[in-house]
Image: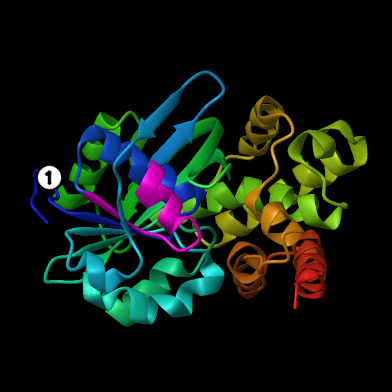
Amino acid sequence: MSSTFPSKIAVVGSGAVGSFYGGKLAHLGCDVHFLLRRDLETVRKNGLTLRTEHDAIHLPRVNAHGSTEDIGPCDVVIVAVKTTANRDLETLLPPLLREGTVLLTLQNGLGNEEFLAEHFGVERVVGGLCFVCLNRGEPGEILHFGHGSLSIGEFRGPPQARTQTLVEIFRQAGVETRLVENLITERWRKLVWNIPFNGLAIAAGKAAVDAVLADQGLRTLARNLMSEVIAAAGKLGHFIPPEFGDEQIARSFEMGAYRPSSLIDYEAGREVEVEAIWGEPYRRAVRGGVDCGRMETIYHLVKRLAATGLKP
């Protein structure tokens, strides 16, 4: 990748996250190519719309593809598939790779950078964390409810010119983006919110964010789960200040009746990202000697409910 600008970008996993951030880059003028399945013909015909409460960005012409072979080698590949589909990447990604291709994963949870490094080389891997409220709307439409910032960092080692370039491109596209020194610390920071709110959305009977906050017991449980995640992160060398949990609760009130992605997958009978969001953090906490009974409970509850809720 050029230290100034990537000439060609692929988005693998063009759901809400991939389409939103890829759409932002395409609106900026980047050469972005989307791998699409469900909405392929609609997007080819009508384009892609990123819709907020107050306005919308419509991209009338989108590079929409049904296979990565059609896209060909790229400078940057944005990986935004659900973590439950990581094995598919072993066949999806090779046609997109050439010397120097960067893999930027925007996936949830822990273990995704390790997967990409193992199969495609650690030198390619950059991680990004999305702090955003997004859902799919009608075919070819992404609904943006709030937030939207990105944190980007190298999987191994300090930031490089390429990471700074990616940060700058997203900033030019109107995305609040920051460069981070320690990517895994940032992943734990995101889990402080994801573990309780994605988990309780399922375990508490399809509870949106406002429903969790409105119930004193659930709100207290969410805050206590946050404390466990913060303690686990600290034990593993990733310091997060205790008051970060209070800040996350306060920010959650802005989300209203937002339904986390895990709840949407669960309601649709699709696989939920159980291991990446709950299983792997719990296992790492146990290995670190952390007392994490609440993390253990929410993991096993979500795992059981997600398994029984799958459509045949």
Rendered position, 49 above or below 260: above
Residue at position x 57%, y 54% from top? 234
| Residue 33 part of the magenta-drawn span | yes
Say whether residue 270 is magenta: no
Q: Does 52 sit above or below residue 201?
A: above
Magenta stretch: give its range. 32-46
State the image quarter where residue 253 is shown. top right
* Residue 299 percent across, percent down from the top left: 75, 66
| Badge count | 1
Q: Is residue 87 left or right of residue 160?
A: right
**Residue 162 in view in this figure:** yes
Label 1, on which residue? 5
Q: Is residue 176 visible?
A: no
Q: Is residue 234 left or right of residue 92?
A: right
| Residue sitting at x 34%, y 46% | 22
x, y percent for residue 272: 66, 65
Query: Quadrant of the image for the N terminus?
Result: bottom left
- Secondary structure beneath dot 1 equals loop
Residue pictured at 72% horizontal, 29% vertical: 256
